[in-house]
Every structure is written in C-alpha cells, then in structure tokens.
C-alpha cells in the first residue's frame, strides 16, 4: 500500500545552533544512516528557525509501526538534536462489493452457522433496518442477541451482539393504603410500631412530625412502612439522623485571656493578654517570639468569662526562621554535575568572572548517557570557601537512534506516582544489569546489581527521584514521584 505522510514540523534551533543560520534539514525513517546521509528536505534557506509543512512519502515501508526523525544542520556544520514522530502503516482496506443475501439471529448459544433463526431481508450491499425480534420464549434474566449475515459469495460475517435483560412482570398495586407506622432503630414487629394517623388513599405524600424527645444523644434510624386494604405490608423506608446535645449560649463577658507556646503550663498560668471586658474580642495581638528557638512552633490562646469558665483554646502553627545572611563575598568557583553528586569541588568546573554567575552555558551530553530524564545541577563557591545551594534543571535525552532506543521505550515502570513499590516490566529481549535510584540532592539512595523487577521505596521520604536502569541494550532514566 502506498500512502503519503504529512508532518507539521516547527524547528526552534537550540543553544548550539543559535549563532548560525540553518543550512539544511534532513530526515530518515527508523534507522540513522549517519549525519548528512539522510534524505534532504527543501527549506526556506538562511533562517535561524524553520516552521514549515513537509510532505514525506512512506511508499516502500512495510506494514507496522515506524518512526520519522528530522534534524537540522547549520552553516558551521553543527547538527541539532532530532525531532521524531511515531506513525503506523496500516494494511489496505478490502472493500466487500458482494450483496448481502441472508441474515440470521440467535440468543445466548450459537446453534451453528446457517441453523439460527432467519431474518427476512432484501438482497443489498448494506442493511440498515429496525428488526422486531420476539423474546417471549426467554426466561427472566440477562441474555445476548447475536446477528450475522451471508453474502452472495457464500461468506458469513462475524456476528454483532447486544446484551439485554428481561425483567419480571411489574405488579401494579391498586389497593388503598389504610395504615402506616414508624419505629426507631429496632423493629418491634409488624403492626406493633407507632401508628401514623392518615386518610386511606392510593399514595401518601405528607410531611410527618415525629417526636425524638425519648431518644438519647447520638445517631439513630427512623423506619416507616404502610399496609394496604388487602392486609399486605410494604417494605420500609428509612432515614438516618442524629440527636445533638442542646446548645448552651454563653452570655457572660470575657474577663481574661492568656497564651502559651507548644506546651500548656496549666489553666491560668500562661502569659496574660491585656484586654477590656466584652462579650467577644476581635483584636490584633502582638506576641513576642524572641525566646523561641529556630523551628516549628504552635501558639495557643484561651479566654475566661465572668463565671470563671475557661474556653477551649484556639491555636496556630508557625515557624521561626534563621536570620537571613547577606553574602557579599565574590564567587571564585563554579561547577556542575548531572544526576549524581560527586561531592563539593569534584564536579565539572565552569569558567566564571565577577560577583555573579549570569551566563548562557553550553553543557555537553555524552552518547553513553541514559535515555530519558536527567537533572543538571549547578553550584558556586565564594571567597569564604562556602558552597551555595545548587540550581537544578530537568532535561530529557531521546537516547541513541535505532533499535536500542525503540526497545528501551518498551520498558514499563509502574505505578508512578507510588507510595511503596516500583514495578519494572521489560521485553524478553532485554536483561537488566543494574539499577540505581537517585534523590534530588544527587545522592544514590538505592543500588542493585541484580536482575530486579520490584523495588521497595516505602522507607524513602516523599519527593521526586530518578530511577536509572542499565541493561545489556542501553540505559533508561525515568522520574519517579514518591507519595
């Protein structure tokens, strides 16, 4: 089958191509023939970015899934990373031009082709009719209807089917309701509950007032049922409700208030708050935290009224932070690492100049790096010998081209996010040689040299991690979220 694949490509050339115009664009399907050896695409010349529609022929490709790769080359000879799209070549559609000459249906179990119940129809290429099919012989319950057709070449189709249910016959009650009763929680027996005063009728739709004065505080259930003129009782209707304690309204003035941090010293012994007697207080209070250490604390406030009753306390959680230090020392060194921290001073050095680092950096990546997610970490050192916290940036590598990259993409890592275990499912063609799990500080927290299919991370803190799987067919790096 010959088909035409049209791909909308929008190229935004990255850092390494930003200083030179694009000279050419080339593409290949599935396997990389080498830089400069792929098929050239006609482009608008001499531009920093390209946003064009390309028509790319897929004739000659086998049926199945393929990947289209496109990359740009500038006038300096530098090549961009490729953009890729996955697509599928489907088999040609076979159109059936023979008329339908016969149709049949059956319920539940197939009696055999040509032995089911015949459907009366007129020979045609297609049939779109509403059929009336009797279900009188079927029992109450769930059933399936199957329909298939035969064409003039004596070929039977696959069947279409529908599931349906035959319900029992509805019994309409035409007798008047003559009695009703209710009870709470436990059934005293039919006819022995509390009677509801009503007028005989086919249906009742009334608002009933039911006393709950005899019930204790807590949760209860009200049940109601009715009896008709043939002495048949209905199933009951029920509602769940709660009897609450009576609300006590406090009309006494607040005459005293106090607060404490973290641990209660005892009622009346905490730090007093200066206030004016009133029914309610809505003031902004200034509370000193100078005596508290750095860390998280809780402030508790309670009040006392003129009858000498203390309230429950209100509380707020807050944090005392360390004083902010302003760093006036110059930067004397900078370094970066990818994923795993080799230690302060042991990462790759960056050239610096001045008090601040504000440069566009070109960070190389090697072909040996794992396909997938990675983190770039950068930190600096000042003249006092102090290293800064690092800045981190997530980036992704598509991996090496060809079969290896395609195979690694079939590795299934689940669930993600997870709270306890990570499962790793690999194709039969891949064997795991080792795995490592890296936290966001660049520390390896789990390492294994075995063929492993399940990793326990229940003991780790919540956050983002990198799982790197090294196989005999390449490496894969994947972000994992621990809940």
Image (tube, grey):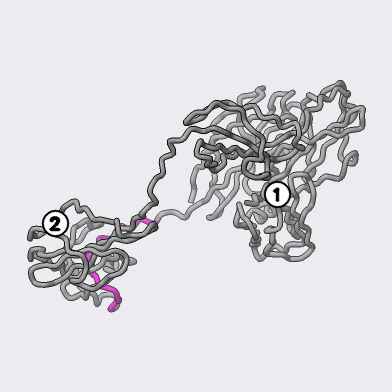
* Magenta stretch encompasses residue 114: no
Q: Measured from the top left, where is residue 248 in percent x and y?
A: 41, 44
In this view of the protein, which residue sits in the foreground, 160 or 28? Answer: 160
| Label 2, residues with CA under 10 Å away: few <14, some 14-19, many ≥20 | few
Q: Which residue is mark 1?
A: 465
Q: Position of residue 374 (x, y in %)?
A: 72, 44
Q: Secondary structure at mark 2?
A: loop
Q: Which mark is residue 33?
A: none
In the rendered image, residue 106 lying in the magenta stretch gets the answer yes
Question: Measured from the top left, where is residue 46 in percent x and y?
Answer: 67, 22
Lower position in the chain sequence, tag 1 or tag 2: 2
- Taking depth in this image into account, of 133 and 46 the one nearest to the observer is 133
Mark 1 surroundings: few (<14), some (14-19) or many (≥20) residues within 10 A: many
Residue at 22% x, 58% y is 124
Residue occupying the point 72% across, 35% down: 320
Vertical arrangement, residue 257 with respect to residue 216, above or below = above
Q: Residue 290's spot in the image, x, y percent?
A: 75, 31
First to last magenta residue range: 94-111
Q: Are marks 1 and 2 in contact (CB under 8 Å)?
A: no
Distance between mark 1 and mark 2 Cα atoms = 64 Å
Location of mark 2 (residue): 204
Dividing the picture into quadrants, the one containing residue 260 is top right
Name the residue rendered at 48%, 51% in the picture: 1
* Quadrant of the rendered image containing residue 435: bottom right
Q: Which quadrant would residue 255 be assigned to in this image?
A: top right
183 sits to left or right of 357: left
Q: Is residue 380 above or below residue 423?
A: above
């Amino acid at each position: 089958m010959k088909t035409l694949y049209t791909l909308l490509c929008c190229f935004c050339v990255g850092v390494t191509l930003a200083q030179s115009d694009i000279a050419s664009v080339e593409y290949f399907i599935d396997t990389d023939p080498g830089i400069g050896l792929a098929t050239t695409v006609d482009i608008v010349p001499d531009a920093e970015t390209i946003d064009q529609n390309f028509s790319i022929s897929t004739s000659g490709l086998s049926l199945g899934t393929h990947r289209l790769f496109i990359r740009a080359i500038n006038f300096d000879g530098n090549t961009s990373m490729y953009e890729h799209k996955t697509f599928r070549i489907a088999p040609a559609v076979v159109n059936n031009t023979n008329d339908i000459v016969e149709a049949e249906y059956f319920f539940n179990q197939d009696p055999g082709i040509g032995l089911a119940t015949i459907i009366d129809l007129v020979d045609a290429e297609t049939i779109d009719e509403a059929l009336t099919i009797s279900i009188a012989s079927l029992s109450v319950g769930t059933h399936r209807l199957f329909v298939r057709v035969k064409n003039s070449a004596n070929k039977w189709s696959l069947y279409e089917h529908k599931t349906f249910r035959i319900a029992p016959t509805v019994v309409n009650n035409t007798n008047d309701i003559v009695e009703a009763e209710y009870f709470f929680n436990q059934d005293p027996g039919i006819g022995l509950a509390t009677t509801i005063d009503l007028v005989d009728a086919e249906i009742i739709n009334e608002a009933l007032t039911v006393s709950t004065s005899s019930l204790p505080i807590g949760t209860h259930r009200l049940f109601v049922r009715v009896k008709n003129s043939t002495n048949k009782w209905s199933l009951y209707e029920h509602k769940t409700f709660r009897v609450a304690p009576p609300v006590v309204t406090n009309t006494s003035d607040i005459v005293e208030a106090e607060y404490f941090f973290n641990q209660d010293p005892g009622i009346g012994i905490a730090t007093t708050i200066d206030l004016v007697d009133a029914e309610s207080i809505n003031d902004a209070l200034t509370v000193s935290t100078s005596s508290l250490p750095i860390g998280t604390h809780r402030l508790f406030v309670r009040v006392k009224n003129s009858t000498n009753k203390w309230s429950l306390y209100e509380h707020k959680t807050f944090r005392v932070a360390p004083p902010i230090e302003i760093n006036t020392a110059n930067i004397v060194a900078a370094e970066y690492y990818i994923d795993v921290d080799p230690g302060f001073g042991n990462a790759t050095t960056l050239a610096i100049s001045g008090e601040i680092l504000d440069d566009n950096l070109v960070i190389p990546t090697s072909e040996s790096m794992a396909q997938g997610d990675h983190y770039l970490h950068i930190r600096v050192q000042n003249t006092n010998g102090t290293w800064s916290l690092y800045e981190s940036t997530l980036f992704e590598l598509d991996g090496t081209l060809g079969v290896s990259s395609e195979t690694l993409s079939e590795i299934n890592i689940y669930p993600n996010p997870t709270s306890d275990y990570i499962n790793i499912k690999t194709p039969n063609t891949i064997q795991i040689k080792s795995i490592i799990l890296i936290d966001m500080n660049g520390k390896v927290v789990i390492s294994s040299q075995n063929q492993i299919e399940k990793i326990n991370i229940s003991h780790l803190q919540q956050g983002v991690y990198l799982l790197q799987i090294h196989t005999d067919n390449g490496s894969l790096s994947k972000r994992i979220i621990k809940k």
